[in-house]
Image (cartoon, rainbow, N blue to C red):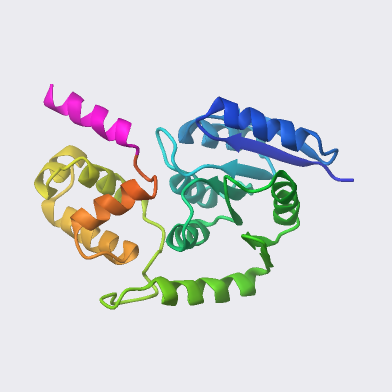
Amino acid sequence: MDTVTILLVDDHPLFRQGLRNVLSEQPDLKVVGEAGDGPAALELARKLHPDVMLLDINLPGMNGLQVIRQIQAERLGTRVVMLTAYHDLEQELHAFRAGSRAYCPKDVTPKHLVQVVRWVKQGHYVVGDRVYDHQDLQNWLEAGIEKAGRPYISDTREAFSPLSPREMEILECVTRGMSNKEIAYSLGISHQTVKNHMTAILQKLDVEDRTQAAVYALQHGWVRLDESASDSTTKSS
């Protein structure tokens, strides 16, 4: 029986311990590492090459979607199961389009979570209690985007697409109340470049303006309020 190696990523040590206890009861599952923030998760993924990563979205330093994007970009081979309290259709769409293999709410039963890990290791995709192959997932994504799309969206192919690292940087700045001019100065890019990125962000998030984009990011756990407040304090001091 092949052993599935697992990396746990969540900023709450007690929750990680609970996951470790559940998974360690299974003879075919082995927790090989834990991380409490996004950068540490990537460092361990590069070092340990786990089969599966159980990953939260709301993390210090780098959110879960950013972690998935980097894992995909570096072709690390680790398959990601999003395990998060932020649970709605739009969040699921973002997670799978970023490269997640499964999406589970944190109130998932231990028995189901164990099975999800096994399914993902076998190459399947899991949405709730539904197990898909690649084509089935694409069909689900298309139906989900159509269902979630709003009347003013201009291109459904762009909606819910992953934000690039630069777009995520700009979105974080927006949640701190920075203007386009301030963002341009802070990131060392032109004002027009910021405007171009903002247009792409609004399209990918399927929102109308920067205020809605900021609210969206905060509501979905992509930006931590404590970090935004800390950064704003540092800037004003």
Of residue 23 and residue 172, the one placed in the foreground of this image is: 23
Q: Is residue 15 left or right of residue 183?
A: right
Residue 213 lies in quadrant: bottom left
Identify the residue at image location x=52%, y=60%: 96
- Answer whether residue 225 is magenta in the image: yes
Q: In the image, what residue occupies the spot 59% across and 46% down?
A: 107
Query: Does residue 92 sit above or below 217 in this rendering?
Result: below
Instruction: Please name the predominant secondary structure of the magenta segment in the image.
Output: helix
Q: Is residue 177 left or right of residue 37?
A: left
Quarter of the figure with the C terminus: top left
Q: Nearer the viewer, residue 175 or 5?
A: 175
Task: Give, as a single range, the part of the protein colored magenta.
Answer: 224-237
Q: Is residue 188 above or below residue 157?
A: above
Please tell me which residue lies in front, 202 or 12. 12
User: Could you tell me which residue is drawn at 63 percent across and 74 percent down?
Assistant: 136
Looking at the picture, how far across and down is residue 205, in whole percent? 33, 62
* Residue appearing at x 15%, y 45% in the figure: 184
Does the magenta-highlighted stretch encompass residue 75?
Answer: no
